[in-house]
Image: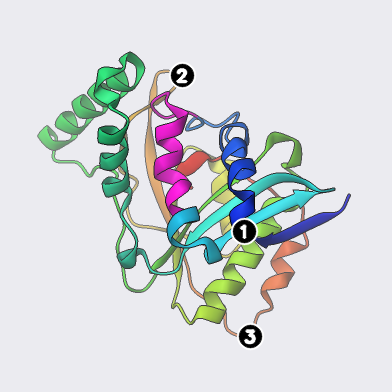
Amino acid sequence: MMTEIRTFAEQDRAELRALFGPAGQGAVTASLWGHEESEAAVYLTPYMDLEPESLFLAFVDGDMVGYLAGCLDSTRFPSDSERMSRAITGHRLFLQRRPMAFFLRAARDGIGVMIRRQPLAGDFVDTRWPAHLHINVAPQARGTGVAAALMGRWLERVVESGAPGCHLQTLAENTRAVRFFEHMGFVKHGPTPLVPGIRQDGHRLHQQTMVWAPPAGQDLRQRQTTGLEPAPAGPTS
């Protein structure tokens, strides 16, 4: 098996967009509100358009099997909330049954949380960890070291850029993903608020923020040597 990690190029756009859906298969967040085009408009297309130099692709024997979409400075990038608002409006999601059901459920969750004065999942902004990422690997490439190779390449870019650190957000209940990110050097940070609208077997799920700072005197390539891979985390990671 020959694995290649390289930076996104414009000619990769169609193939990468086609991978977006399959790469999320098996994840709770594989389809958030049931409209793949608008979900890609939130979690993939902006990275192709605005920061392609921080978008890394994984190939196994010539086939694209995964990607990592990164951003070095989240304050200079549209927030998740902004991107989602544009997607809802641009794709007229409130006129479609499945997305509308999701957003109504999310609204009810949000109201309940406010009444109970509990935290709610949202954007994360902290100058200590300004970079962020989303990672997805197709089912056939999980457990092969591809995700670790993508993460290693991204963390090298963070270090080379001079950014002080990086954050990501996943689901607290996705324990395999959390363990993988911990193996890559991330640590849990802050509370685990409710993610509105999402359910797994009828249960509500919670957001886990994790942060990473460059380890002094450690070769990041050492973290690419194991086959430990996360369970599919979907676009929240």
Q: Residue at x 32, y 37 (%)?
A: 87
Disc 3 designates what residue? 217
Task: Please give the count of numbered marks on the rendered protein.
Answer: 3
Mark 1 to mark 3 CA distance (whole Å):
32 Å
Percent position of residue 196, x then y: 29, 33
| Residue at the far left in the pictured view | 115
In the image, residue 25 sits, relative to residue 20, either above or below, namely above
Give yes or no for residue 106 being in the magenta stretch: no
Of helix, strand and loop, which one carries label 1? loop
Which residue is depicted at the point 40% across and 34% down? 38
Residue under circle 2? 201
Q: Would you identify the image quadrant in which residue 78 lies?
A: bottom left
Residue 115 in view here: yes
The amino acid at mark 1 is Ala
Give 133 or 59, whichever is nearer the viewer.
59
Q: Is residue 162 above or below residue 108?
A: below
Name which quarter of the figure residue 88 lies in.
top left
Three-letter code, disc 3? Gly
Residue type, numbered disc 2: Asp
Residue, disc 1:
9
Q: Are marks 2 and 1 in contact (CB under 8 Å)?
A: no
Q: Main secondary structure of the magenta part?
A: helix
* Depth check, front residue: 12 or 38: 12
Left or right side of 103 for 42: right
Q: Position of residue 39 (x, y in %)?
A: 42, 36
Query: Does the magenta-highlighted stretch encompass residue 34?
Result: yes
**Mark positioned earlier in the residue sequence (2 or 3):** 2
Q: Which residues lie in the magenta part?
A: 31-47
Look at the numbered disc 2 and give the secondary structure of its residue. loop
The tag earlier along the polypeptide, 2 or 1, is 1
